């Protein structure tokens, strides 16, 4: 793909020439939303089902106050109790024509009890009251035509009851479904929503222009972003709610990040400059779309509140934390690196779950750029760009964040940065900078997640060992500062944090010694007729996809063929071997350390080399295979993002 050879600074003229792709992308995004809204089914139906306490999904098109958390009847049907006053708001509802809101309700009382009387008001104007009897029924609330957008509906129950001494809630009636009927006039998105979509699409195009990519690439990137956010707005009719307002700060962040990245690239060599900007644009745009998915009201909370509570504990001065694994529930220290990183921003972000997720996604984007730098100096700029693209495309990071393994992903990002830092400095004569940076990054990794420390310490030690056998003498000498950095990071991490948990280690090891491999995580998943080897394959395929794994195998073979004793392939191989050992350990013992996440930079870098080596053959079959493998990987990454909103 050709990259612009424009000057290294972003001149006003360059921005002016970029206006047409920004304008086109913004227009396409707005048109896509308009067409999508007009072509969707007329009635909008939403069950009160929220996926349970773990998912805790919120409706996309309305917000409520006064409804208690979702419960389930004996037959599994979801419902939510309403308190004495319920407030339902549809922030961006088109009011050009009369609409109707219907709630399926029942009183929740005995059949002999009198029906519950409810006063109904729309935008503060009291309307016809409703009565709710024992059987399920629908009550219709007229939303008259009005100027502007938005509607606020209030339901006040005349009487409530308390179930008993074990449940002191004041309950009025039960709700299981909310329906919006637009009537004869189809809905249209509000001007605010259209502007938000256009700004996001145009912002991504402008980010690409700031990175000095060709105008047509900027235009395509912006249009793709506009279509992606349109899909999100159409999901659960979020264009009617407040979701669009969350896109504005994200748009500003995208443009600002691209401008900073482009300016930072000015200090790079001429050969690296254009590649750096292309990699930055890919990482920023894809990360922005991921953040947009997790900003959606239907995004699950999962264990996000667990991390918020942990961060609050750290903010209050409680630093020594522990947690337990999934079955068989081993206790282990719970380092606080992510929570410390969030403290400077804590007061500025009311949505603390999204703050922690945002920091984790940004760290992952920085890893993608760091891998570009490490790979590009070894295997070429094109391979570096491929590494960045694959790093943000494979599903494993999205899957881990969606299940709220935030500290693990953040810790692994720090460790991946350390790997890239070591790889970058292998060919440089800056031992002090290499050692200091490696020590800081490794310490941050070890102090962010226990699993990262357990895997990362032997992996980093293995890097120091194998580098000593590098073919190039200058590279081989680097093992000294690598070993020193690893030792310093281990001592620092232990002294600061892990030395406080000797009793925890004693209890856990005594349990591990008493329990067998039948309690391992992999064994639990493989308790059917499936073998453990098949289960391990399922893990890797789900996390990376067959395309990335096959490309990684080809890339590894290519690296061996070029010279297996080159420093960078030795570094990746050392990490891969250690991760493989921990995968086997999890298969045959009760110890599971999520090595499938730790191997991320290894698979990504070798897969990138596999891509470019096959593409360089200029033959149809290898290039077709590369295209299919990359397309499959991107598809799996998109499917992982979709699963964030629909799983459970």
Image (cartoon, rainbow, N blue to C red):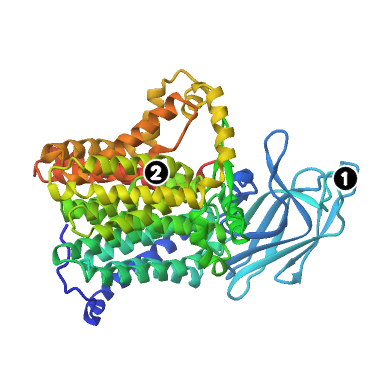
Q: Which image quarter: residue 229?
A: bottom left
Which residue in the protein does label 1 denote? Answer: 165
Q: Earlier in the sequence, mark 2 or mark 1?
A: 1
Secondary structure at badge 2 equals helix
Furthest residue toward bottom: 12
* Mark pair 2, 1: CA separation: 46 Å
Secondary structure at badge 1 equals loop
46 over 247 or under it: above or below: above
Q: Which image quarter: residue 627?
A: top left
x, y percentage for residue 333? 54, 44
x, y percentage for residue 253? 41, 68
Q: Which image quarter: residue 278?
A: bottom left
- Image quadrant in which the N terminus is located: bottom left
Mark 2 vs 1: CB contact within 8 A: no
Looking at the rendered structure, which numbered label has been put on residue 396? 2
Residue 185 seen by the camera: no
């Amino acid at each position: 793909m050709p990259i612009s050879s424009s000057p290294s600074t972003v001149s006003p003229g360059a921005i002016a020439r970029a206006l047409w792709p920004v304008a086109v992308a913004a227009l396409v995004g707005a048109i896509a939303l308009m067409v999508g809204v007009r072509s969707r089914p007329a009635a909008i139906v939403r069950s009160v089902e929220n996926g349970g306490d773990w998912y805790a999904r919120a409706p996309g098109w309305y917000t409520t106050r006064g409804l208690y958390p979702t419960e389930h009847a004996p037959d599994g049907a979801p419902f939510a109790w309403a308190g004495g006053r319920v407030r339902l708001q549809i922030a961006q509802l088109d009011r050009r024509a009369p609409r109707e809101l219907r709630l399926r309700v029942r009183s929740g009382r005995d059949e002999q009890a009198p029906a519950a009387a409810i006063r109904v008001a729309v935008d503060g104007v009291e309307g016809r009251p409703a009565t709710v009897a024992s059987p399920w029924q629908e009550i219709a609330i007229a939303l008259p035509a009005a100027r502007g957008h938005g509607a606020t509906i209030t339901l006040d129950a005349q009487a409530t009851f308390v179930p008993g001494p074990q449940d002191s809630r004041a309950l009025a009636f039960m709700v299981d479904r909310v329906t919006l009927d637009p009537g004869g006039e189809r809905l249209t998105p509000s001007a605010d929503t259209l502007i938000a979509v256009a700004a996001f699409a145009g912002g991504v195009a402008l980010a690409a222009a700031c990175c000095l990519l060709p105008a047509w690439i900027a235009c395509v990137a912006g249009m793709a972003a506009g279509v992606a956010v349109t899909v999100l707005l159409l999901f659960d009719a979020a264009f009617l709610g407040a979701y669009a307002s969350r896109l504005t700060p994200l748009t500003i962040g995208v443009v600002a990040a691209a401008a900073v990245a482009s300016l930072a690239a000015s200090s790079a060599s001429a050969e690296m400059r254009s590649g750096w900007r292309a990699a930055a644009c890919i990482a920023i745009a894809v990360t922005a779309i991921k953040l947009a998915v997790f900003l959606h009201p239907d995004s699950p909370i999962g264990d996000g509140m667990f991390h918020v509570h942990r961060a609050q504990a750290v903010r209050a001065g409680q630093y020594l934390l522990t947690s337990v694994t999934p079955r068989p529930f081993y206790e282990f220290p719970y380092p606080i690196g992510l929570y410390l990183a969030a403290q400077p921003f804590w007061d500025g972000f009311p949505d603390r779950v999204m703050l922690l997720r945002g920091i984790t996604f940004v760290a992952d984007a920085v890893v993608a750029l760091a891998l570009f730098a490490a790979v590009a100096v070894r295997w070429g700029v094109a391979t570096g760009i491929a590494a960045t693209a694959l790093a943000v495309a494979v599903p494993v990071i999205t899957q881990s964040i969606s299940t709220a393994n935030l500290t693990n992903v953040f810790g692994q990002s720090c460790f991946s940065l350390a790997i890239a830092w070591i790889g970058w400095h292998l060919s440089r004569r800056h031992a002090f900078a290499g050692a200091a940076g490696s020590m800081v990054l490794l310490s941050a990794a070890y102090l962010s997640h226990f699993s990262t420390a357990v895997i990362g310490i032997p992996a980093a030690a293995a890097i120091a060992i194998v580098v000593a056998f590098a073919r190039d003498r200058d590279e081989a000498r680097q093992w000294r500062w690598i070993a020193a950095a690893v030792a310093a990071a281990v001592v620092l991490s232990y002294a600061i944090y892990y030395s406080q948990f000797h009793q925890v280690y004693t209890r856990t090891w005594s349990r591990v010694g008493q329990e067998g491999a039948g309690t391992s995580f992999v064994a639990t998943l493989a308790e059917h007729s499936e073998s453990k080897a098949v289960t391990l394959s399922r893990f890797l395929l789900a996390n990376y996809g067959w395309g990335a794994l096959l490309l990684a195998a080809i890339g590894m073979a290519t690296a061996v063929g070029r010279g297996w004793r080159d420093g960078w392939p030795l570094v990746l191989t050392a990490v891969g071997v250690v991760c493989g050992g921990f995968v086997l350990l999890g298969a045959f013992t009760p110890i599971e350390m999520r090595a499938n996440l730790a191997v991320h930079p290894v698979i990504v870098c070798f897969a990138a080399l596999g891509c470019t080596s096959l593409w360089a053959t200029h033959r149809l079959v290898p290039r077709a295979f590369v295209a299919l493998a990359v397309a499959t990987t991107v598809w799996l990454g998109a499917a992982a993002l979709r699963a964030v909103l629909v799983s459970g």
